[in-house]
Image (cartoon, rainbow, N blue to C red):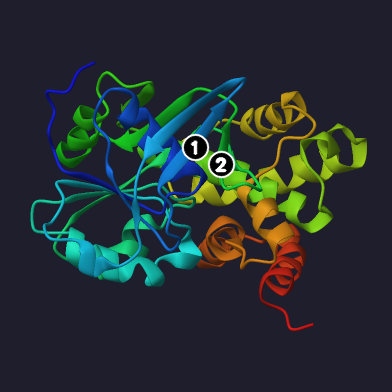
Amino acid sequence: MNTEINAAVAVVGPGAIGTTVAAMLHEVGRTPSLCGRTLRDHLTLLEGSHSMTVPGPVRTSPKQITRTADLVFLAVKATQIEAAAEWLAVLVGPETVVCVLQNGIEQVQRVGPHAPRGRIIPAVVWFPAQAQSDASVRLRGDVRLTLPDTAASRVVAEALQGTRCAVDLAADFSALAWRKLVQNAVAGLMALTHRRSGMFSRADIAELTLAYARECLAVARAEGAELGDEVPQEILEKFQAAPTDMSTSILTDREAGRPLEWDIRNGVVARRGRAHGISTPISDVLLPLLAAASDGPG
């Protein structure tokens, strides 16, 4: 094991994504501090028939933190940023890098006000991890992050060096972030239907997916993302190739009755579209349905 890197690393939000990153670090002897809402003495990551235990405890009070961290992985959802603000207040100092493991393209704008002293780095998370009913996490693919190619991102890459979490530093980060956003926007259809990836084998859903992805792509290009015409088809085929029972975080939240990340995954397409004078007729139908599913009333 490589234990030479001794940076103080904290994971805030040990859910599906946070548990996976914590497990990758623990596996090479760099167990991070764990911060969350629920007291647990360990985390569990499941891969196939293999189980990995990450020792805790999960700290539940910012008052338990006695020093700032060198690196914070912020793995709470966008709907939980304000709830995590107290953690950021005690963990983040002038030299702290905050790697935001969240969906969307607005991580810096949303997290920055809560960590004004830190260096905020957005990330694109490419791995499928699902929380299970017993609080364990099921990992169903290779672990990979994409970060912008900056000095602060290299702090993250160094911390994860030698782990099974691959880190890509991308000069075209904006394009990759938008591509992932299109994928996440399409996944919103799963929350509305209460169906998993198998639904994309339906011809009518495939047609709707392509039309919606093309709408998102037009907005992404207006934002400067260099993405080709093949992207909608590739995203559809990715859903069709997934196990039929593959879920997504927005569907998991819907099933649990939690608030949905509808604005940062879907609403942003319509908002940015309006700014560019681009019509988004599919978004105009989906957004009220997602917002009502998330926030009610009723």
Could you say whether the residue bearing mark 2 is in a helix, strand or loop? loop
Q: Is residue 131 left or right of residue 73?
A: right
Indicate the amino acid at tag 1.
Answer: Thr
Could you say whether the residue bearing mark 1 is in a helix, strand or loop? strand
Indicate the amino acid at tag 2.
Answer: Ser
Graded by Cα atoms within 10 Å as few (under 14), some (14 to 19) or many (20 or more), the crowding at tag 2 reads many
Q: Residue at x 68, y 46 (%)?
A: 187
Label number found at residue 94: none
Quadrant where the N terminus sits is top left
Q: Residue at x 72, y 67 (%)?
A: 284
Provide residue 286's location: percent of width, then percent of height: 74, 62
- Residue 97 at least partly seen: yes
Q: Earlier in the sequence, mark 1 or mark 2?
A: 1
- Residue 270 at least partly seen: no
Q: Are marks 1 and 2 in contact (CB under 8 Å)?
A: yes
Q: Image height check: is 297 above or below 33?
A: below
Counting every numbered tag in the picture gives 2
Residue wearing tag 2? 136
Provide residue 64's location: percent of width, then percent of height: 22, 64
Q: Is residue 291 left or right of residue 99?
A: right
Q: Image height check: is 115 above or below 292?
A: above
Residue wearing tag 1? 44
Q: CA distance from mark 1 to mark 2?
A: 5 Å
Q: Quadrant of residue 233?
A: top right
Along the line of sight, the residue nearer the viewer: 109 or 192: 192
Graded by Cα atoms within 10 Å as few (under 14), some (14 to 19) or many (20 or more), the crowding at tag 1 reads some
Along the line of sight, the residue nearer the viewer: 150 or 140: 140
Provide residue 94's location: percent of width, then percent of height: 8, 58
Q: Residue at x 57, y 47 (%)?
A: 135
Q: Is residue 185 left or right of residue 65?
A: right
